[in-house]
Image (cartoon, grey):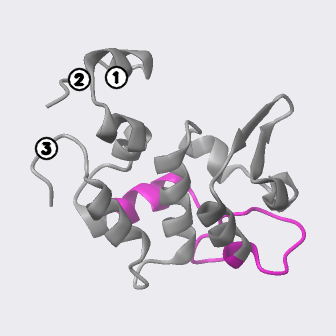
Amino acid sequence: MNEGCLPTDHEIVSWLVDIRIPLAHRVLWSLLDESEVRIGELLNLEVPDLALDDLMLHIAESKETSISEKAATGLRQLVGTRQQGPVFLGPNGDRLTSSEAAETFWAETGMSLHILRHGRLDRRSPSPTRHMLRGHLTHAS
């Protein structure tokens, strides 16, 4: 594991391709890493909120976010033929909870799931200003 504040791109990619980790978690982690969307917003997504051909997620009535083709592919695999219901399902078939997501991330990485809120932009251009704009005052070593 990386000794710095944030995981490296290499570490994150290794987690996202680890087939031992359930697909729902890997797709969630990918979206947390690449977007500004909060975990609660992602976990509340319903299948009809996905506009995968347009590479968009409809987060709320007036909020949308674009996603990568790779994330859209993961979401397509995750949702399969389902037309309704939660996007992210837990092991019991109910909506995945933030506690389940956080526990799985910790078990697999030894890190807090919150670290993905800092995403790729922070790993590529860490600065005190960026952390402050994202609501955190942390060092950028």
Measuring 31% from the left and 56% from the top, which residue is drawn there?
Answer: 9
- The foreground one among 106 and 141 is 141
In this picture, which residue range is highlighted in magenta? 77-106
- Mark number for residue 108? none
Q: Which residue is mark 2?
A: 138
Q: Earlier in the sequence, mark 2 or mark 1?
A: 1
Residue 64, image quadrant:
top right
Secondary structure of the residue carrying tag 1 is helix
- Mark number for residue 4? 3
Label 2 with label 1: CB-CB less than 8 Å: yes
Label 3 with label 2: CB-CB less than 8 Å: no
Neighbourhood count class around disc 3 (C-alpha, 10 Å): few under 14, some 14–19, many 20 upward: few
Measuring 32% from the left and 39% from the top, which residue is drawn there?
Answer: 124
123 vs 98, left or right, is left
Task: Give the image location of residue 55, x and y in percent.
Answer: 75, 54
Q: Earlier in the sequence, mark 3 or mark 1?
A: 3
Secondary structure of the residue carrying tag 3 is loop
Determine the CA span between mark 2 and mark 1: 6 Å
Secondary structure of the residue carrying tag 2 is loop
Determine the CA span between mark 3 and mark 2: 12 Å
Q: Which residue is mark 1?
A: 131
Measuring 75% from the left and 48% from the top, which residue is drawn there?
Answer: 57
- The foreground one among 37 and 123 is 123
